[in-house]
Image (spheres, coloured by chain):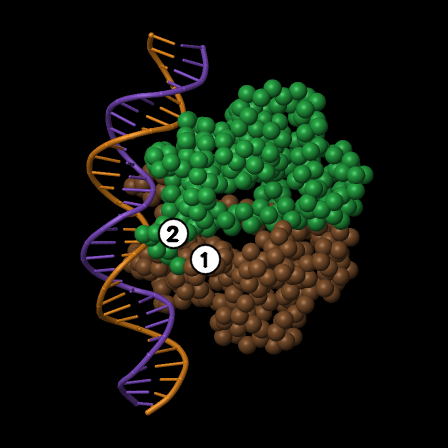
Chain colours: A brown, B green, C orange, D purple
Amino acid sequence: MAQRKIISFETIRVACKNCTLSQLCLPMGLSPDDVDRLDSIVKRTRPLHRGDHLFRGGEHFRSLFVVKTGSVKTYAPSEEGGEQVLGFHLPGEIIGLDAIDQDCHACSAKVLETSAICEIPFQRFEELSASIPSLQHQMFRLLSKEIGHDAEMLLLLGKKNAEERLAAFLISMSRRLSKRGLSPTDFYLSMSRHEIGNYLGLAVETVSRLFTRFQDEGMLKVDRKHVQVLDLATLDAIAGSAPTMNHKLRSN
Amino acid sequence: MAQRKIISFETIRVACKNCTLSQLCLPMGLSPDDVDRLDSIVKRTRPLHRGDHLFRGGEHFRSLFVVKTGSVKTYAPSEEGGEQVLGFHLPGEIIGLDAIDQDCHACSAKVLETSAICEIPFQRFEELSASIPSLQHQMFRLLSKEIGHDAEMLLLLGKKNAEERLAAFLISMSRRLSKRGLSPTDFYLSMSRHEIGNYLGLAVETVSRLFTRFQDEGMLKVDRKHVQVLDLATLDAIAGSAPTMNHKLRSN
DNA sequence: CGTACTATTGAGCGCTCTCAAAACCAGTGG
DNA sequence: CCACTGGTTTTGAGAGCGCTCAATAGTACG
């Protein structure tokens, strides 16, 4: 996932415009003028590095964030130092939507690799969207899309076994990366096995064993964080919640 | 949960106003005038009965729905007739938010008991919220709240064991019912054990066994769908994701 | 009062976790 | 250049939670 890419300031400025565009505006047109108004409230931040926090749980909510390059994970810290990884966010994806309600962040967001992030002050964004109906509509859609995505994760965690979960995870990464113009079959995972397992509700060891198995079965070629998908069709079939041949549906 | 309540048309009309109010407007004030404008676009529907559908997956999205009385479940039908229960919706709660994005319902909504439902045509609602900034803000909050709730479910399905899941479910029901002025310790569950298990990612048998266990341990008194919580504090403690004494955290 | 459905209870097994240890990697300092 | 150290990943062996299968009881309804 573009680990050691050199990022010029100009690159960020331009691409940042693109990323807000692609997320909020592309699907249904804003006028070029409205796009400029939107873009004028977006702040650019200098590149963040592995381990940096966009925000921490409990902090006051001020802005939404959009990943320009790199990747970010969101997680809910629990009492005893444990955490639940809530999601991984790739370029073009938005972070912080869950904080609008409480006006305060319920989860934390940590950068997984050197990343460029755009910041959208929410108050100003709200004012803008009140005056641009199609922007309001896009925002509703964006929030709704997030809810739909969460529903998929509920299905994954509620019904799928370990094999199906990892396959679904890889397919999701593949799709999202290819949407950004990257290879759907050859990519780097910026998160650790530990984080993948946490996200999928599996133990690290189970994730590791599955990577090995998938490789043995010829579906993947795995070297550390570098993944090459050799048989996307089979992987997709496994991910598709279709219970494995020798399994019946669980509890339904 | 108010199973055999007689509902007059007038009751619905008045209470329907209340329910849209409490969900969308109460938290931050709309002017009484704006409230009337909102209320004027809300459709009342005659009472629906057990098994009726508000909508089915794949149908075109036109309206959001608010539960006035009764209860509704949303679920995602999967390929082979199986289904994943996505949520149970009690009075005052809104349904259909996930359909805004695709302009088409991804899940189905089925009435669990005789219920009164309000319908909010989304197009008209959007127009209205563009002209009432505080309504727009409330809608953003509502969508965000849903995302936050989903995150809680992810944590539940990803990290909690069967005991903690059922406890969390019961605490959730208790809280939501008491928010509507009903008893937090004495209520009827309108959904079957099967549906509870499906929702929580557990087998029916496991749910049944846990109800029995909770009762044996003196935390609950259970008679079919009638639940009385005898020790809310303990139940709350179990639900609070705190791993049981003899368990460590799972995979984090 | 039979039929169908839902709920309960019991017994056994399997998937995934836990525990443990080795292999591998990256960074640091001698 | 290499040993040392902390981290991540891999691999192995065993155990337990929760599922599956199966049978019984209880409930709703015609």
Q: Where's residue B126, x and y in %?
A: 72, 43
Residue under the point 70% across and 37% down:
B21
Residue under the point 68% across and 30% down:
B16
Q: Secondary structure at mark 1?
A: loop
Q: Where's residue B180, x and y in %?
A: 60, 35
Q: How many marks?
A: 2
Residue under the point 68% across and 24% down:
B11
Residue B245 versus residue B73 in the image, above or below: below
Q: Name the residue carrying label 2.
A: B243
Give left or right: position of A90 versus A37. left
Of all residues, the one furthest to the right in this rendering is B33
CB within 8 Å, label 1 to label 2: no
Give left or right: position of B21 versus A242. right
Residue type highlighted by circle 2: Pro
Image quadrant in which the C terminus of chain B is located: bottom left
**Share a chain, discs 1 and 2?**
no
Residue B23 versus residue C1 in the image, above or below: below
Q: Where's residue B147, x and y in %?
A: 56, 49
Mark 2 Cα-neighbour bin, 10 Å: few <14, some 14–19, many ≥20? some
Residue D25 versus residue A237 in the image, above or below: above
Q: Where's residue D8, x and y in %?
A: 37, 68
Residue B82 versus residue C30 in the image, above or below: above
Q: Secondary structure at mark 2?
A: loop
Q: Name the residue carrying label 1.
A: A79
Mark-to-mark CA distance, 1 and 2: 10 Å
Give left or right: position of A196 versus B130. left
